[in-house]
Image: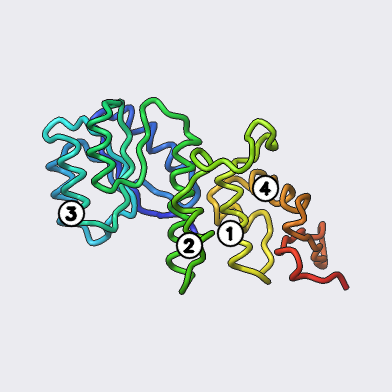
Amino acid sequence: MTISKNVWIIEDDFRVAKIHADYVHNIKGCIVTENLRTGKETIEKLKMTSSLPEIILTDLYIPDVEGSSLVSHIRHLYPSIKIIVISAATEISLIKDIVDLGIFDYLIKPFEEQRLQRAFQKYLQELRLFQNSKNVTQNDLDSLFYSESNNKIVDEETFVKGIDLHTLQIVKSIFEDLKTQELTASQLSELIGSSRSTARRYLEYLVGEQFLQTKLIYGTVGRPERKYVYHGTYEQN
């Protein structure tokens, strides 16, 4: 499974919109299919399109409409669309109103590219859970509703450099769902929307934690392929 391929951006500054689009395109499987500058244009596109976006990135300062009104309109008529607000607005009353509308995430300008990637990873985790599971566990729900920022079990200062707790939980949940299926670093990178080297870092960390085991697959030519499987489901022959 890959991350959403249909992302819209609502931003009246074309330079900012391009930066955000570049960030999105760096996430595997994601394509910005619409760059919109006004509320009117957005509403018309939503009415006409045959393929609704899975995710909309929107500013709150839109020339022809209050951002909160546009968000409310989209949430009311198209509740399946995930809205990520990207704005310089920090007024608590405004943010409270926006959060109450049911937005998926809120990023304050300027923000780091990695922060947007984490938002998309959270979306992927939710998508995987609802599409692949008939029933959920409390741990599944906890991973959706509680991030490491507000429910720290591990002290980040003592955690391994280069390992993000939220991403680590996503990787672990993938293997817990798959159970007996083996994955390579390339396959995992597609699932979590990362580079192959990043995926391998998480895989090797989990091997060290004895959460995963590895096996080498030898082909007719070239180096053997390294695969990873959930601990306890693979026995060495």
Residue 173: give its label: 1
Q: Residues within 10 Å of mark 3 (few under 14, many from 20)?
A: few
- Could you tell me how far apart the alpha carbons at marks 2 and 4 are, in whole angstroms? 19 Å
3D distance between C-alphas at marks 3 and 2: 24 Å
Question: Where is mark 2, residue-wise?
Answer: 128
Mark 4 lies on a secondary structure that is helix
Q: Earlier in the sequence, mark 3 or mark 1?
A: 3
> CB of mark 3 within 8 Å of CB of mark 2?
no
The residue wearing badge 4 is 202
Q: Residues within 10 Å of mark 2 (few under 14, many from 20)?
A: some
Up-down relation of residue 226 to residue 39 (above or below): below
The answer to whether the residues at label 2 and label 4 have Cβ atoms under 8 Å apart is no
Amino acid residing under circle 1: Ser
The residue depicted at 55 percent of the width and 56 percent of the height is 191
Query: Which part of the image, by quadrant, shows the C terminus?
Result: bottom right
Label 4 neighbourhood size at 10 Å, few (<14), some (14-19), many (20+)? many
Three-letter amino acid code of the residue under disc 3 = His
Q: Which residue is mark 3?
A: 76
Q: Secondary structure at mark 1?
A: helix
Q: For this rendering, which residue is in front, 190 or 221?
A: 190
Q: Secondary structure at mark 2?
A: helix
Q: Nearer the viewer, mark 4 or mark 1?
A: 1
Q: Residue furthest right?
A: 237
Amino acid at the residue labelled 2: Arg
Q: Which mark, by number, is residue 108?
A: none
